[in-house]
Image: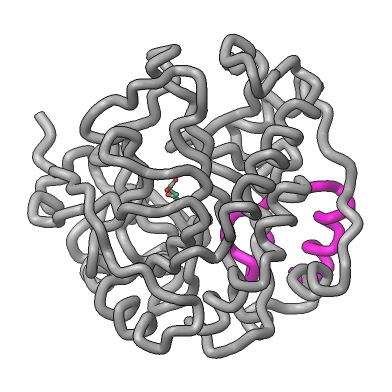
Amino acid sequence: MQNIKIEYKEVPRWSPQDPEMLEYMDENGFAVVANVLSREETNTAIGLIWDYLEELGTGIDRNDVATWDNDRWPTAVHGGILPSHGIGHSQAQWYIRSVPTVKEAFANLWQDDELLVSFDGVALWRPWTYQRNWKTNEGPSWLHIDQHPLGRPGKHCVQGLVNLLPTSPQTGGNVMVPGSHRRFEAIPEMYKERLERIHPTIDHFRFPKDDPLLADAKPVICHMEPGDLMLWDSRTIHCSSPGMGTPDFDDRLFRAASLICMMPKEKSNEKVIAKRRAAVETVTSTTNWSDRFINADEFPQVLEDLASGRFKLPTAPELNDYQKALVG
Ligand SMILES: O=C(O)CCC(=O)C(=O)O
């Protein structure tokens, strides 16, 4: 029995440079930025994601849902996220991160435009109306934060995702618990034993399934248009969840969202930046952090699949000066 109810909601959609967005972010721990990608750019991005999938060489055909089975699909972790197999350096991800309005929104929040970008992946939801076991995890089972409450006290990171397909109460999408970044400091006291099991360098804390302490949390799935950017403080409790109903189609993706995080370069250092430059050449993906180098190809779920040699990884991208500056 779920005790955490998620509401689908319209929230303010800010322009990238709006100073009021900062206040909203401070209050809520997240903010939606409107139309950082135009419809045309969104369509280009989706086309490039399919190019990436088809070029893995496993037999995926964008026009044939029967070819999207687990044997051909790259490793997906919780929430249908594809974190690895070169996706962090795919043409798709480099295309989306290089749209100037994406950086403008992060620069507004940080009040700093010398930023480094993460090399992370994409959330893609295959239609579970076609195959039931493609259904992604229900929100109350994996509400989490992406920052260790003891290892990294205070504010460190703003994560982001660019939504590429229309959201609806049926498809569901990203879930945020408004204002929950303010619960962060109480976590060590409230979840002492659970936290003791997590090494301070691991920036992921998952709340218990249907956590009674979150019964008052009021999580929301924010309505997002294609091209909108969701920004959230890594201390904000979040996840993703299928919707309250079921979409009435079975031949297209339910959701596509590009994970993009930008942090001030001054938070990083030369050693990390050297690893980041090398990661471009080896098409190594990372998590959201750019102040430390955290290799997403080393996730346990991914290692086995990578070793199978089934996937043809993309070639190293040729970056322009704007993109090189985002590497560091
Ligand atoms: O797919 C989503 O919206 C959830 C993303 C998420 O939980 C994360 O990037 O930490």
Q: Quadrant of the N terminus?
A: top left
Q: Please tell me how many numbered marks the rendered image carries.
A: 0
User: Extreme top residue here?
Assistant: 66
- Residue at position x 60%, y 54% in the image: 287
Horizontal and vertical percent position of residue 159 = 49, 64
Horizontal and vertical percent position of residue 253 = 50, 29
Horizontal and vertical percent position of residue 108 = 51, 84
Residue 47 is left or right of residue 81, and the answer is: right
Task: Please tell me which residue lies in front, 43 or 100.
Answer: 43
Color theme of the render = one colour
User: Extreme front residue here?
Assistant: 40
Q: Quadrant of residue 30?
A: bottom left
Task: Please tell me which residue lies in front, 250 or 150.
Answer: 250
- Magenta stretch containing residue 285, yes or no? yes
Q: Quadrant of residue 104?
A: bottom right
Q: Is residue 151 above or below residue 215?
A: below
Horizontal and vertical percent position of residue 314 = 83, 38
Q: Quadrant of the C terminus?
A: bottom right
Residue 321 is left or right of residue 69, and the answer is: right
**From where the camera sits, is residue 194 visible?**
no
**From where the camera sits, is residue 283 visible?**
yes
Q: Which residues are magenta?
A: 272-293
Q: Is residue 203 above or below residue 67?
A: below
Residue 146 is left or right of residue 326, and the answer is: left
- Residue at position x 49%, y 83% in the image: 17
Task: Please tell me which residue lies in front, 93 or 158.
Answer: 93
- Residue at position x 83%, y 28% in the image: 312
Task: Please tell me which residue lies in front, 57 or 201.
Answer: 57
Q: Is residue 147 above or below residue 241?
A: below
- Magenta stretch containing residue 138, yes or no? no
